[in-house]
Image (cartoon, grey):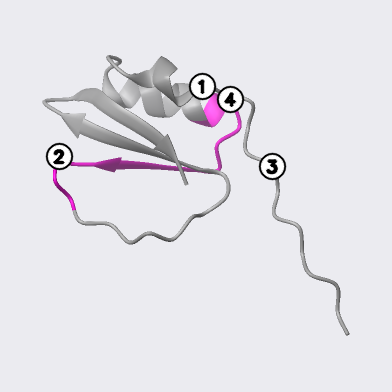
């Protein structure tokens, strides 16, 4: 039987640090800090509940990050 794969660890980063930043700058900073996927979403966007290791999600309103979470 094949071993169960271990997902890579998320970067050691605080998602709250991105709140209030402009979306482009926040995405650049997140990629520099090791996030493999950065996703910007409009407020109220419907998303699935799947967790993807290495992904950082931004809720962006008027070009500013209003909320940020892993997965």
56 on left or right of 48:
right
Give the CA separation, mark 2 to mark 1.
Answer: 21 Å
The percent coordinates of residue 39 (x first, y second) are 36, 43
Residue pictured at 79% horizontal, 69% vertical? 4
Residue positioned most to the bottom: 1
Mark 3 / mark 2, whichever is N-terminal: 3
Give the CA separation, mark 2 to mark 4.
Answer: 25 Å
The percent coordinates of residue 27 (x first, y second) are 40, 29
Residue pictured at 51% horizontal, 54% vertical? 52
Residue pictured at 70% horizontal, 48% vertical? 8
Give the CA separation, mark 4 to mark 3.
Answer: 13 Å
Q: Which residue is mark 2?
A: 43
Q: Are marks 2 and 4 in contact (CB under 8 Å)?
A: no
Helix or strand or loop: what does disc 3 sit on?
loop
Give the crowd class for mark 4: few <14, some 14-19, many >=20 residues within 10 Å.
few
Give the crowd class for mark 1: few <14, some 14-19, many >=20 residues within 10 Å.
few
Mark 4 / mark 3, whichever is N-terminal: 3
Q: Nearer the viewer, residue 19 or 32?
A: 19
Residue pictured at 17% horizontal, 41% vertical? 42
Q: Which residue is mark 1?
A: 14
Q: Nearer the viewer, mark 2 or mark 4?
A: 2
Give the CA separation, mark 3 to mark 2.
Answer: 28 Å
Give the crowd class for mark 2: few <14, some 14-19, many >=20 residues within 10 Å.
few
Helix or strand or loop: what does disc 4 sit on?
loop
Q: Which residue is mark 4?
A: 33
Q: Are marks 3 and 2 in contact (CB under 8 Å)?
A: no
69 on left or right of 5:
left
User: Where are the magenta residues, as a range?
Assistant: 31-45
């Amino acid at each position: 039987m094949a071993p169960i794969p271990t997902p890579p660890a998320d970067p050691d980063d605080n998602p709250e640090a991105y709140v209030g930043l402009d979306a482009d700058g926040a995405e650049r900073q997140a990629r520099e800090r090791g996030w493999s996927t950065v996703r910007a979403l409009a407020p109220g966007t419907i998303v699935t509940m799947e967790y993807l290791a290495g992904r950082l999600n931004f809720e962006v309103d008027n070009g500013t990050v209003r909320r940020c979470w892993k997965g």
